[in-house]
Image: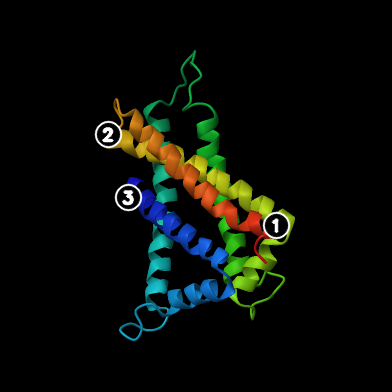
Amino acid sequence: MAVTGAILVLFLVGHMVGNLKTFAGPEAFNGYALWLREVGYPLVPKRGLLTLIEVVLLAAIVLHIWSAVALYRRAAAARPVRYAARRRSQAGGYVVHIMRWGGVTIALFVVYHLLDLTFGVANPAGVAATPYTRMIEGFSRWYVTLFYAIAVIMVGLHLRHGLWSAFQTLGLARGRQGLKVSAALLSAVLVVGFLSVPFAIMIGVVK
């Protein structure tokens, strides 16, 4: 769970930085998109490293979900009979719902996000449009931006709790308030970074 989570966090950071190139204009963003497909060429085939990254990400996502299900089943098997009285806690409150339903929301969004901006089949600009044009056309629709915002906020909440849980698992969280703050800060930076682009498009700052 922790290892696959770390891989996904690194991807999110890199993806956010790439998205921010939208503010540099179409030439910079399209150039970045082209670089992703040609990085390593001619040492490796075009799109070779990108395909490898995609395979690693897919494996990390599958293993992350599998780990979550396995841990849930292990916890249920360890305590098959519920407590007669249970104190409400953060672990039994909104965090459980965020981690469970947030994961479902994120998974659904990732599928739509790929169809919209990567493959272009759900994008008004179509498959032939440049990546920058697909970005602009995609987030010009308020309902897409709203769905994106909900998914990104879910990612932030999921990430904040996930990082803190990883610190606890590794025995680093005991008495380390700074680590808790760091987990919240990284999550907040990612949420703001990801949301800055679609909202800038919505209000016309980026065209």
Residue 159 occupies which quadrant of the picture? top left
Q: Secondary structure at mark 1?
A: helix
Q: Residues within 10 Å of mark 3 (few under 14, many from 20)?
A: few
Give the residue drawn at x 41%, y 52%.
Answer: 9
Which residue is outermost to the left? 171
Q: Secondary structure at mark 2?
A: loop
Which residue is outermost to the bottom? 42
Query: Residue 94: percent from the left, percent from the top?
Result: 55, 30
Q: Which mark is on residue 194? A: none
As shown in the figure, which amino acid type bears the numbered disc 3? Answer: Val
Q: Which mark is on residue 172? A: 2
Q: Report which residue position mark 1 lands on.
A: 202
Q: Secondary structure at mark 3?
A: helix
Query: Residue 48: percent from the left, percent from the top?
Result: 38, 78
Nearest the eye: 21 or 47: 21
Nearest the eye: 99 or 69: 99
Nearest the eye: 139 or 119: 139
Label 3 near label 1: C-beta < 8 Å? no
| Nearest-to-viewer mark from 1 and 3 | 1
Q: Is residue 116 left or right of residue 15?
A: right
Residue 190 showing in the rendered view = yes
Give the residue drawn at x 39%, y 40%.
Answer: 163
**For the residues marked 1 and 3, what is the alpha-carbon distance in whole angstroms?**
36 Å
Q: Residues within 10 Å of mark 1 (few under 14, many from 20)?
A: some
Q: Report which residue position mark 3 lands on.
A: 3
Give the residue drawn at x 54%, y 48%.
Answer: 192
As shown in the figure, which amino acid type bears the numbered disc 1? Answer: Met
